[in-house]
Image: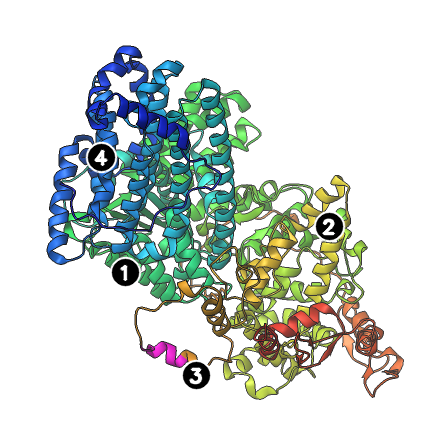
Amino acid sequence: MLGHKQNFGDSLEVATEVAVPDAGCVAETIDRLRKGAIPEAALDNGLQDLILEQQPLDIETLNLSFEKHLEDFMELLTERNKLRFSVTTLAHLKQYIINLQARQHRERRQQGFARLSLFLERFEQLSEMINQSPDAMKFMGCIWGPVKFLLEATEDHLDASSEILAIYEQIGRNQPSASMYTDLTVTQLNLTHIISETYKDVIEVNKWLVLYFQQRLWTELYTTTWSRHKPKFSSVIARMVSRYDLVGSRASISQFDSFLSNSTIQEEQRLSMTDRENFGRMQAINAWLKPTDLEFEQEFLMGMRANYPDTCRWLLRDDTFDEWFDPQCTTTTSPKLLWLNGKPGAGKTVLASVVVQEARALKPTPTVLFFYFKHEDSDRNNFLSMARTLLMQIIKQTPLALDYFYHKCCNSGGALLSSRTLIEELLAFALGNCTSAYIVLDGIDECQSRREKGDIVKWFRDLVEEQPADSRDRLRCLFVSQVDSARKDYNHLPSITVDLENNEEDIESFCKMKSSQLVEKLKISVHEANDIAASVSASAEGNFLFAHLMWINLCGQSSIDSLDREIKSFPTDLDKLDKIYARIMKTIMRKSVRAEREEAMMVLGWLVCAKRSLKMHEIQTMKSINLERRVVEFERRRFRVEPKDLCESLVEVRDDGTVELVHMTARSFLANSEFLDAVSEELRLTTLCIDYLNLPSFDEPYTERAVLAGEYGFMEYAILYWVRHLEAGLKSSNSEHDELHEHLTESFEILIQQHWNNPPGDGRSVSNRTREMLEIFSGSEKYLQIQLAVTLTDKELKNFGDLRPDQSALDFAKIVSDVRHCIETTVQNIRDQRTRDDLKLKYGINLFKCPRFSCRYFNEGFSSADERDKHIERHERPFRCTDEHCRGSKIGFATKTHLEKHRKENHPDTTERPHDFPTEEEIIESMNDDVPEPEAEPDPEPQTEEEENDTETQPDIVVPEQSAAPRRKTKQDYECSHCNKKFNKKFNWQSHLKSHGEGQQLHCPHCDVTCKRSGDLARHMRLHDPDIAVTCGGILWNGQRWGCGQSFARADILRSHYQSKRGRQCIAERDSSQ
């Protein structure tokens, strides 16, 4: 049956410390058989009954143990394989092998299936030994079935097929025969337990192999992932070898116990090492993809339902939804696409979170992907951020593909995956490898542009609709959005509308539960509370947000009289949300304490205009800025009440410290209401950012005292977004904002004076659009510098490549570097836990941050310096060797050319090419060997869009008399005695006076350089100090010099030099000689 024997030398390596069978024992057994004149084959065929007579198997215990070993295995199988394996017999497997041998014989590509002979023989004997078990066929089917499946899957893949045969050949070689089991009866060993452990090992091998080869795209993954999976099988086969030796030598009970203990420890050590390696790879991929972590959002949304578990269940009972969601539903072969829509505030996002939760509970567990879009957040309002996040979610749920994406990461040549083409390719591949995937995309209407919305919907529609008819239920995509002008993107899709008919019962249930709070607080009757609940429910008309806000308002009343007045004034027209927001604003404006009203409006203005979600420590620092004293007085001026209490129900504070408006509709209402002038708020925020950066704490030296005082908690936001607030404020400003323009001009001139970096170039690089926008500064003596500052800062924020320090208009890069160095030194030197907690309050967590403005981790940071440094290395030396044991995987290479050279010299087996001639891409690459690979453009910075004109009238609000006219300070001018320049703000006048220094110029004694400030002179003098200055270059092993020889005052400036084009060439010159 198993003819055509061939000698195949490839096999899995087995740990060297495992002992081989004792030669003396083997010789003794052979001699005993010879003297008894009993053929071995006849002995094996006749000993099963003898074994069972001398030591009968405990069938009940065997069944339980076999079932336990199969639990994890069966859960990982596809439904098709579950059915196939349970009915596969040895006869089916043998017949398939015969047919496969014949087919391969005709095609002259035989694989040597004789290697399976011993495996089939030994497990056929095992089958006969357990044939008294009622589930014997199922148990053996989980051995025969996987082998048949693996041979089928790898039939056309020579390398993979050979690996499968080698694995089962070694398993067969190391399985005891029936005669060997007979000899164990004299040692009184538990035969049931030994057979159970034997079965466990082969099922474990089957599990890993089936899991790998039932991947849809395993052929594409094989080259980059198989090598790291082989050690798994080696460790199991090593156990089999040891067990075979123990059985053959008729080991004692204590020897078997010792073997089990040692093998358990060895397996734990192997798993621990693998987990460490995988964790490192996962970290590298995470830094490369820069995904948005939405688990906090998912947990927050689920927490909102925690006290109302029966809500949202209507969606799960909907027939249209069930047809899309139910994995067993086969009533249609149409693509699994669904559109969930509704008005703002209807509860669509909470429903989306319920779908995610329900999909995660399915068995077998599918791949569950979700993304919650958010309009003003650049990490949550575009295709690139969504794709990177979904890709990371897939990798976490399909660890077998980890090595494939790690290989892509190491060869990308960039610290951040920014190429849209590559992202689309990788996401399509990852989804193509999923056996089953549920994709939930909520808030698509909040994308940054109409085009972006359409692109996202089209991409997923094309992906799902192009699936073959027999596998259209493999990918299921749920779109969640408002019914807006983009509804044509969802043409011909099944849809569900979240409206009064669907939401009514949930809102009634919610209102009844909330009404109990009124009974407890105001001591009204249950009957009255039920009437109020019914009234709120009816007024909501299917809008959950309305009901939620209304109940916050009602439960905040302090008397029955005020409760009655609120109830009588329920909104009855169509603009219910605007009406309820207006009522909340009325509550804020009626606060008896003027400071509370002003501070609430200040926070709301910040949140409406913020270019990303603000953190609590940033809001506290903004509040603590004292411009009169020109310091941050964190302890004296920070909020001592929660923003949620200050701004009523308009604000939410998340567990991660993020402060946000309750809903996007709240932002729209406030931006277009009479309570806030969005343009004025943008200009005020611009001025606040600039005034903050003009504080003395941003002049050298930077001290531990300033760090501990919380001076730098707003630094990242101010540096990144002052120019974005400027653009948004100037786009729609007019003569009504002249006073704000005047203050802004004054502050801007001080910013130029204190932080100008003398960049090369002139006004020719300034676009006409920028000139028109900055026309209000045309009367300033620093008009040209202001133009350059805006232009170059905008370029710096968008550029993800290397920028020389002198290409920045302002010296913020150096300030950030020095300030962070001071912060990190302070944190590392502090041992007092109370002080550490105080720093978290002032700066948040993850204090070790990336220095590149365009990198996400400039804001978010890392928990340790090591993590941050590894991330920066990916900026500086982005090309990595994929061999983790190689030095090149740790330090990387500056150019792709050097990586390829390293691979050819050190890993020649990984550089084989399937073609002999260079591709067109390789020809282009060879022409640019000495040029560092350009990094891709980053995500676009969030741009403020013009608000739509709101022609609808705002609700009339009666504002208390005491808050109608804020108090004005007497205007006072401050005049410079040197140049007669006048200032409206004392702190700007004081900053200006520094520039004169009584007309004194500070001269360098070593060269002709002059400086206005002593700090500038001290920094320059370091270039002449041989004990401090550092130089680019050194001596190579062959005695030659490398580097350009340029001197720098500090090591961090030298590192910045190495990031430039010229510096990378210096590094390449050094590495090429190694």
Left or right, 578 with reference to 618: left
Instruction: Read off the residue under disc 4.
Output: 120
Graded by Cα atoms within 10 Å as few (under 14), some (14 to 19) or many (20 or more), the crowding at tag 3 reads few
Q: Can residue 651 be seen from the camera position used here?
A: yes
The residue drawn where x is 28% and y is 56% is 460
Q: Mark 1 to mark 3: distance in Å?
A: 38 Å
Residue 973 screen position, x and y as percent: 79, 72
- Which one is closest to the eye, mark 3 or mark 4? 4
Numbered tag placed on residue 927 in the rendering:
3
Instruction: Read off the residue under disc 1.
Output: 458
Instruction: Read off the residue under disc 2.
Output: 827
Q: Mark 2 to mark 4: distance in Å?
A: 64 Å
Question: Over which residues does the magenta segment extend?
Answer: 917-924
Assign the magenta stretch its main secondary structure.
helix
The residue tagged with tag 4: helix, strand or loop? helix
Q: Mark 3 to mark 4: distance in Å?
A: 57 Å
Q: Mark 2 to mark 1: distance in Å?
A: 49 Å
Residue 284 screen position, x and y as percent: 50, 55
Q: Can residue 339 be seen from the camera position used here?
A: no
Q: Which of the marked residues, 2 or 4, is nearer the chain's N terminus?
A: 4
Total number of numbered discs in the rendering: 4
Image quarter where the N terminus lies is: top left
Left or right, 471 with reference to 810: left
